[in-house]
Amino acid sequence: MKYLVTGAAGFIGFFVSKRLIEQGHQVVGLDNLNDYYDVNLKLSRLQLLNELTLFNFKQLDLADRRGIEDLFAIEKFDRVIHLAAQAGVRYSIDNPMAYADSNLIGHLTILEGCRHNNIEHLVYASSSSVYGLNSKTPFSTSDAVDHPVSLYAATKKSNELMSHTYSHLYDIPTTGLRFFTVYGPWGRPDMALFKFTKAIFEGKPIDVYNHGDMRRDFTYIDDIVEGIIRTQNNIPIRNNSWSVEQGSAAQSSAPYRIYNIGNGNPIKLTSFVSALEKAIGIEAKQNLLPMQAGDVYQTYADVDDLFAATRYQPQMNIEQGVANFVQWYRKHYNV
């Protein structure tokens, strides 16, 4: 089949594109190569993808309505995996308009492309951040997600609502995946693992928020990719017996689904740092700080419905996953 993968030069998009090509599919990768983080890292990922004969790269911004419209019309995709977005919870506090352009208008241009081009299935990235002020754990897709604590989270909730509307009106199968703290080789420099690793190697202190009393459902990149690949083959269908009053919020009478995609095993931040210290062989200097605005105490994924639908089951433990990242970091940056 022919896939559009948006955010192909990004962390998750890179691995998803690679996996699809290994399965024999043709991939058109879209990315605007913005400078939210080091463009050289994006170009390095892209260089590896460009060596694959079934990959074709398009540099294009999601907010370019005519450009996206033409791309869909010319390329005739079978399926779309939409992973591009303006990422980052804290960045959204200072740069809100970037999220409107990429996450709201950008998601709408993808939905319009799917609407007018008979796309079999749209799988898109949501986020665990939509759970916001929820304190009940583990986070379940049947829970209400009406109280986000960052603009980033609000845009991801909006993506789910927009997708449901298009599934309902135009019969477009859509599946949203709420990612939980993805990490691993080729990961993003703005994420804790990358920042901590860099600081430790440079002998600088790491900023540990809420004095280390935080828990995250760290999910290894290979597990995330496996879940995405399984999900895109699980195309939602209409369910006329579903109702708002009795049905799950993660489903609909429309061909629409929402799943958590995480490890299902939250790790305390102090344990995460210990695993990193062990992998590097250096003790971290820690700058203990209070909780940041827009942050949450804990993320914890209930993945039972994803398992029931796809038999998704994460495999990687935190110690080995962190060690794999450190090994990649040493090699890539010649440390």
Image (cartoon, rainbow, N blue to C red):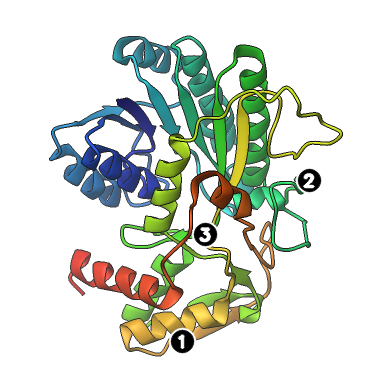
Can you say whether 319 is above or below 65 in the image? below
Q: Which callout, 1 or 2, points at the residue further toward the start of the chain?
A: 2
> Which numbered circle lies on residue 181?
3
Q: Nearer the viewer, mark 1 or mark 2?
A: 2
Query: Which residue matches tag 1?
Result: 285
Residue 123 percent location from the top left of the image: 49, 34
Label 3 sits on a secondary structure element that is loop
Q: Quadrant of the N terminus?
A: top left
Query: Which residue matches tag 2?
Result: 144
Q: Which callout, 3 or 1, points at the residue further toward the start of the chain?
A: 3
At horizontal 68% and vertical 25% (from top left) the residue drawn is: 239
Number of on-image labels:
3
Q: Amino acid at mark 2?
A: Ala
Please give left or right for residue 17 compared with residue 143 in the image.
left
Q: Amino acid at mark 3?
A: Thr
The part of the image, by quadrant, that contains residue 177 is top right
Residue 202 in sight? no
